[in-house]
Image (cartoon, rainbow, N blue to C red):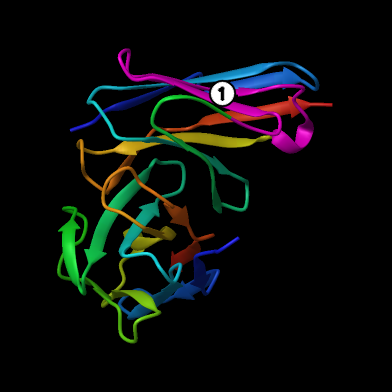
Amino acid sequence: KNEVEQSPQNLTAQEGEFITINCSYSVGISALHWLQQHPGGGIVSLFMLSSGKKKHGRLIATINIQEKHSSLHITASHPRDSAVYICAVPTNFGNEKLTFGTGTRLTIIP
Amino acid sequence: EPEVTQTPSHQVTQMGQEVILRCVPISNHLYFYWYRQILGQKVEFLVSFYNNEISEKSEIFDDQFSVERPDGSNFTLKIRSTKLEDSAMYFCASSEARTGGYGYTFGSGTRLTVV
């Protein structure tokens, strides 16, 4: 059964800073999800990746399958990026249900 | 972009009452899920559904819970007799495939408050 660790738990940064959030998991996976949760509670899928790197606007996600580690980066951070960022992986390889990390609460100060 | 739609967005109910949370998954998706998040805690899996039957459920998903796909488009979660500890955000999700999470999409959630 997969265990997911995220770091840091909380992150406060100034507008414009480069942000990195990390996620480690214990069992080999087919794909990893990065999700964003705003104060209202809704979840938005940012990325699903199984290898390498994906970019969407100012967001970049990378994954190292051998090391069982993924990072989410935000370039030129903005106050509207303030949210909880959650990493999720399949509970077991080849399984469709997800195990979630505890999330990283990001606050960007203007 | 296709969306998973959940209704209602908020529901307040008295303890012991039945509630039905509704979801409309993406039309060509085959796998459906319910997750919940108690305030301040991680999102946790409740149940997955495929081919008109439950494919997996967690220990949380006891006899008080049931799921149904009554008409080929809606996917519902019923809680028969709500308890205070059922207060949580409930998320529906759907995906195209069993592995790889292709097209895994979440709804915006239903906040359930049991009083």
Name the chain letter of the residue that bears numbered label 1.
A
Image label count:
1
Which quadrant of the figure contains the C terminus of chain A? Answer: top right
Which quadrant of the figure contains the N terminus of chain A? Answer: top left
Where residue B16 sits, quadrant-wise, is bottom left
Q: Residue A48: x and y, percent?
A: 45, 38
Q: Residue A47: x and y, percent?
A: 51, 38
Residue positioned 25% across, 22% down in the render: A26
Observer-nearest residue: B99 or A92?
B99
| Residue range corresponding to the magenta coloring | A55-81
Observer-nearest residue: A106 or B112?
A106
**Residue B15 relative to residue B109: left or right:** left
Residue positioned 50% across, 70% down in the render: B6
**Residue B37 relative to residue A8: left or right:** left
Q: Residue A103: x and y, percent?
A: 47, 32
Q: Return the residue at label 1.
A: A10
**Residue A21 relative to residue B37: left or right:** right
Q: Residue furthest right?
A: A110
Q: Secondary structure at mark 1?
A: strand
Q: Is residue B68 above or below residue B97?
A: below
Q: Is residue A39 above or below residue A19?
A: below
Observer-nearest residue: A51 or A84?
A51
Amino acid on which the number 1 mark rests in the picture: Asn
Categorize mark 1 by other alpha carbons within 10 Å: few (<14), some (14-19), many (20+): few
Q: Residue A105: x and y, percent?
A: 57, 30
